[in-house]
Amino acid sequence: MPFGDAVSRFAVQRYRTRLFVARLSMGRIPTLQVINLALAIVGAWSIIYQLLRFLVPIRNVALGLTLAGVAALLIVAVLMWFRLARRPQDMFSAAARSEDRAELLRTAMREGMSQDFAYENLARLYAPIVCQVRQFLPAAKVDWPTDSEGNRCLVITIAPAEAQRLDKLITDIEGPRGADWRRRVSEFASGRQAFMTTMRRSASLANPFGDEAGANIVLARISSAPELTMSVNTATYGEIVRTCDSLVNEFAMFAGLASRSAFRKKPRPLLFDGADLLKVLPWRRQIHSWDDQDALLVAPRRRASGLGVSLALVDEKDGKAAAFVARRSANVGTYPDVLHVVPSGMMNARATTPHTAEDLAALPRLTMMSEFLEECFDVAELSGHSVGNFAKRVEEKADEFQVSDLEPVFTGLAVDLLNLRTEVCGVLDLTDRQAVIDAFNLSWEYTHTERLRRVDLTTSSPTVHRADFVQSGIGSIHLAAAWSKARRGAPT
């Protein structure tokens, strides 16, 4: 839908009006802020009155006081507008003050994630950056998947030019980050963390592992010549969700507000160009400012860009291959209540000592197999942050469930444009392994109110809708479909 600069700029003001109304409806302003507001009005009133007496001799005291009062109220109103209408991140801090407010915001965010027009706004923002990724990685195959309706999903895939082993992917772990880096990533998006803490008080939304602790692998740089490789680093889970997954929460709130009018709540979706969109997404705008645009997705060294895995379980019957997907639980910290491939997860460091070259090479496969066992067979003991011989425990559990002969195949990387995180993607071929599939018992990370689904990989466009999926999950399905076609000898 074409639109001009004037339409986009007007959309910014309309969005801020909606934000202002939403912020006021969130509940009573804290008492301290009310007192500060009253003092500001009184102080501005007296100062303006004295200025009027000095600049414009007014003999009528009542008239002077009235003019000064009107001017003071206007000034305070403008200050309130700037405070409440230009800081969407404050919605999370306001919602964190009570469980009722947190639930209201969570419900609004869930609705926002279903607003397809908002995805198109973000797709326009990243179109030039995706072009730069193709230039940055000339030896790799960079694709931008679309959903069943032909809409661009908020994920790009990066596949190696030739088939590549999984243990050739991670080649280097960089040294510790400085104090400035640690301070920046540990203090960012504090309102989001406060909101999550309040939300976790509900037993139905509790997360046994919290939203801060745990050492994880983060991306430092992707290279494509001669093979697809990456260098990594480590960060805490809290640092990752603050500088990556907070962007999903911000997007969800934006999408909900931008979809309906301020007062009558009628559907009135807003359209923005790239620069104006970042004006109403301050967390994303700040994250973008930390790295050069050409490094934002492939060399994100100034934030904690968490690295994860997405494993497509492929089952082929009657010449048709399918991958399994399930709806994520409301309890998970990021991307709740949407579909994703099973299994998936973040890449834990799994050690307190420096990683050797062998450790790094084995980490993607180890993570994929541990997530497979944990999520598909509900092996809870593999979900923690053990510092023991984790690889041996995974091997023992694989033997127990008779899947030790299965080997993940590397298909490529999926870069999620919503949370700006990268996932290592692979397939695990379960064809003719019906007994393994029959033994599935999904973990708490997936809702138990819906059945496991199958997505056909042999169609020209898998039947997925971008607003109902984890974006990296769509990328994983896209890469699995390419792998399936190549195995059947079909053109990709």
Image: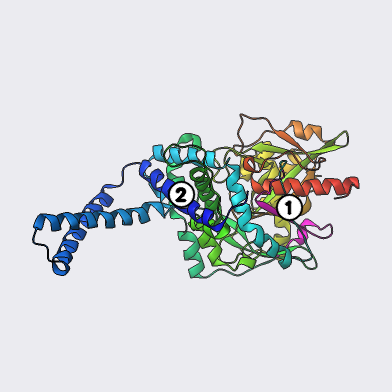
Left or right? Give the position of 75 relative to 196. left
Q: Which residue is mark 1?
A: 365
Name the residue beneath numbered marker 2. 14
Q: Residue visible at 19% across and 55% down?
A: 69
Q: Which mark is residue 247?
A: none
> Circle 1 sits in a helix, a strand or a loop, which is it?
helix
Q: Is residue 157 magenta?
A: yes
Name the residue nearer the viewer: 312 or 268.
Answer: 268
Q: Tag count in the figure?
A: 2
Q: Amino acid at mark 2?
A: Arg
Q: Tag 1: residue type?
A: Arg
Residue 215 % position (x, y): 57, 56
How far across and how far down the image is residue 363, in percent?
Answer: 70, 56
Q: Is 132 placed above or below 472 here?
A: below
Image quadrant in which you'd find residue 356: bottom right
Label 2: few (<14), some (14–19) or many (≥20) C-alpha neighbours in 10 Å:
some
Q: Position of residue 345 (x, y in %)?
A: 64, 48
